[in-house]
Amino acid sequence: MYDRILLPTDGSDGTQTAVEQAIEHAKTYDAELHVLHVVDQSVVDLTATPATGGIAADVLREQFDDEGQTLVETVAAQATQAGVPTTTEVVDYGHPHEKITSYATDHGIDLIVLGTHGRSGIDRHLLGSVAEKVIRTAEVPVLVVQLAE
């Protein structure tokens, strides 16, 4: 049913539930697990203002890269321990929902598993909802997992 499963992760608290669901689905369907971390480009743009200078922006970008790589490697290690050895680990920059859906299209992903905090009201409006945007724009099924707080 599923040959390639995408797990976008942001490393926020509670994401372990989504990780476990993605790994379990990959095991059940003998599917490849793709792990993606997207650094929100708007955050990078804010930190790279003229006031911070080019060197500070480069240092921050390196930190984002390192943190993202650690996140995807940690999930990949969990997948390997669970018997899902085939993982693809990617750190990318951009608008998270756009990168997630384009990655899914470009790599023939059959299922996207992602977490949501389930915010509502003003919090959802101000922070936006990557999960909601992915659900609205993805061309493949999306399994949304409620994250523990």
Image (tube, grey):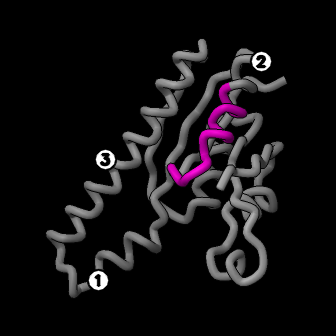
First along the sequence among labels 2 and 1: 2
Which of the 4 quarters of the picture holds residue 79?
top right
Numbered label attached to residue 49: 1
Q: Which kind of residue does numbered mark 3 sit on?
A: Asp
Q: Is residue 5 left or right of residue 9?
A: right
Q: For the residues marked 2 and 1, what is the alpha-carbon distance in whole angstroms?
A: 47 Å
Tell me the amino acid under the disc marked 2.
Answer: Thr
Q: Earlier in the sequence, mark 3 or mark 1?
A: 1
Q: Nearer the viewer, mark 3 or mark 1?
A: 3
Q: Position of residue 56 (x, y in %)?
A: 18, 70
Three-letter residue code for mark 1 = Thr
- Is 144 included in the stretch rendered in magenta? no
Residue where numbered disc 3 is placed:
66
- Point out which mark residue 28 bears: 2
Secondary structure under the numbered disc 2 in the rendered image: helix
Residue drawn 49% across the image and 62% down it: 94
- Left or right: residue 37 versus residue 66 is right
Q: Residue, x 77% and y 59% (percent of image)?
A: 137
Residue drawn where x is 79% and y is 43% of the image: 143
Q: State left or right for residue 45 relative to residue 79.
A: left
Give, as a single range, the part of the protein colored magenta.
11-23
Q: Describe the element under mark 1 as helix, strand or loop.
A: loop
Q: Which one is nearer the viewer's eye here, 25 or 57? A: 25
Rendering coords of residue 86 (x, y %): 55, 19
Helix, strand or loop for disc 3:
helix
Q: Is residue 122 left or right of residue 48?
A: right
Q: Position of residue 78 (x, y in %)?
A: 53, 25
Q: Residue farthest to the top? A: 83
Binning the other alpha carbons within 10 Å of mark 3 as few (below 14), some (14 to 19) or many (20 upward) gives: few
